[in-house]
Image: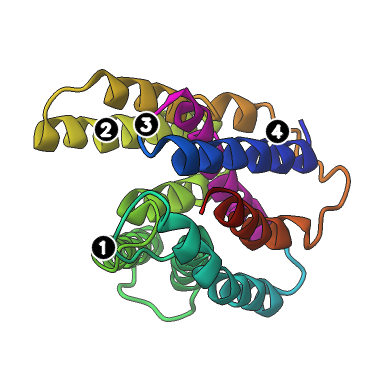
Amino acid sequence: MTSFVLKITAMITMCIDHVGNAYFHHVTFMNLIGRIAFPIFAFQISEGYIHTQNLKKYFLRLFLFATISQIPFMLFSSLYTTGFTFNIFATLFFGLISIWTYDKLTNSKFTICKNNKLDLCFKQLFGIFIAILVGVLAEICNFDYGFFGIAIIFMFYLFKNDKLAMVISFITACILKYGINIILYGYNIWYILLGIFTILPIIFICAYNGKQGKKLKYLLYAFYPIHLLVIYFIFM
């Protein structure tokens, strides 16, 4: 499965999710399908960081479209909820920051202690701590997917060379996310189903063959704010 197929899958399932939100105003099977989208986007951020030829432009694209998409996202969100939330591009941007910070720290030349292995361990722990802080900030500031979003973006990068660890950490994060919801708000079968469908995209991610496939370039970036506006004007 190429990156192109993954992105198209994420775009389609995201659109289904958003139409379901706008039309039904409560959780439906369409939202279950929509849980497939974000983990794929999160994985693509990790892959994008690894393969991008110009990191500054990558950061700039995410920031630019996070800014452009905010008003369309707010209009769309007004169809079914109240309150302010930062859109998914903002979450992806912060996730990229957590990856970049960890990478810079672990590969920096400054030393914490003379033992090389221990020094690397300290740097890695500090990098993970920074990623946690970024996740906490995303949660406090009400980013779409919040702490969970930053966490899985970071874990996809952290375990990029260990598929088993990636799968285990991702499934654990999903169980914790919806398990906490059950603890806070009480048992609801929808939490179980949402958790299952959030785990489901790991199958597609594991089927990824490392190839780009057809180039989408700015299609995904443009699709996000445009489809939000289209849905808003249809259901307003």
Report the magenta residues as a range: 27-50
Q: Residues within 10 Å of mark 1 (few under 14, many from 20)?
A: some
Identified at 76% across, 36% down, the residue is 5
Residue 11 circle label: none
Q: Classify residue 55 by image quadrant.
A: bottom right
Ranked by sequence position, the earlier of labels 3 and 2 is 3
Residue 136 circle label: 1
SS at mark 4 in the image: loop
Q: CA distance from mark 1 to mark 3?
A: 26 Å
Residue 212 percent location from the top left of the image = 82, 46
SS at mark 2 in the image: helix
Q: Tell me the amino acid under the disc marked 3.
A: Val
Q: Which residue is mark 4?
A: 208
Q: Which residue is mark 2?
A: 178
Q: Tell me the amino acid under the disc marked 4.
A: Tyr
Q: Is residue 225 visible?
A: yes
Mark 2 and mark 1 in contact? Answer it, CB < 8 Å. Answer: no
Left or right side of 13 for 34: left
Q: CA distance from mark 3 to mark 2?
A: 14 Å
Q: Provide the major secondary structure of the magenta segment.
A: helix
Tell us which disc is closer to us: 3 or 2: 3
SS at mark 3 in the image: loop
Ranked by sequence position, the earlier of labels 1 and 3 is 3
Q: Which residue is mark 3?
A: 27
Q: Is residue 95 visible?
A: no
Instruction: Based on the picture, tell me whether residue 49 belongs to the magenta stretch.
Output: yes
Quarter of the picture holding the N terminus: top right
Above/below status of 53 relative to 42: below
Tell us which disc is closer to us: 1 or 4: 1
**164 or 10, which lies in front?**
10
